[in-house]
Image (cartoon, rainbow, N blue to C red):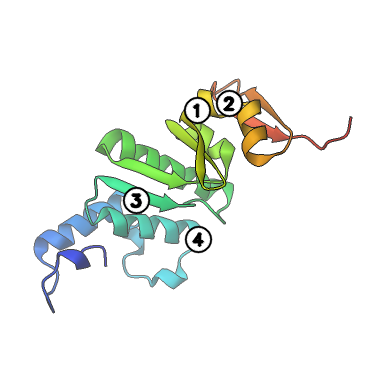
Amino acid sequence: MGRTPYQKSFGFESAGDIEIVRRAMELTDTWQFRDRPIQELSGGERQRAIIARAIAQEPKILLLDEPTAFLDIKHQKEISNLLSKLNREHGMTIISVMHDINLASLYCNRIMLLKNGGITKIGSVEETITYANIKDVFETEVYVGINDLTKKPYYMLMDGKK
């Protein structure tokens, strides 16, 4: 399906289309699922297949809306690693809406915080994931620390008890 925009009316896939799809599926580790209906795949497998379909269109920019939503931590990591690889090794710009601030902090180069439909802060992870910014945008008390292993900021909710 990822090559549909490149096919002529009532056309079939060319050998080049099939090769592009194969490469996209190998890159996303979905080639092994090529003979299975997408409905039979797990959430993480399905998300990788959807990303493979997008990659088959050979974009320079990939726009994603919550690519790790509803996935367990194993599949969140797999999808995040895949997107990071597409950015680093294939020069693809990845723009993603995410509500998981800690995951964004680990994998993103730049972060934009939105509030009421407007940009509140945009910049590096270190510039955006701060106590003041999180409190302003989400109107809640949090603890923001630095992960000892990654040196990236992370947040934890505070229960409000003193």
Number of residue marks: 4
- Of helix, strand and loop, which one carries label 2? strand
- Where is the C terminus found, in terms of image quarters? top right
- Of helix, strand and loop, which one carries label 3? loop
Verify CB contact (< 8 Å) between mark 1 and mark 3: no
* Distance Cα–Cα, label 3 vs label 2: 28 Å
> Residue 138, how many percent across, how many down?
65, 40
Give the residue pinned by disc 4: 43
Give the residue pinned by disc 1: 125
Which mark sits nearer the N-terminus, 1 or 4?
4
Q: Amino acid at mark 4?
A: Gly
Q: Amino acid at mark 2?
A: Pro
Verify CB contact (< 8 Å) between mark 1 and mark 4: no
> Residue 75, how many percent across, how many down?
51, 50
Looking at the rendering, which quadrant does residue 139 occupy? top right
Which mark sits nearer the N-terminus, 1 or 3?
3
- Where is the N terminus found, in terms of image quarters? bottom left
Residue at left 57%, top 22%?
A: 149
- Of helix, strand and loop, which one carries label 1? helix
Give the residue pinned by disc 3: 28
Question: Label 2: few (<14), some or many (≥20) within 10 Å?
Answer: many
Q: Amino acid at mark 1?
A: Val
Which mark sits nearer the N-terminus, 4 or 3?
3
Q: Amino acid at mark 3?
A: Thr
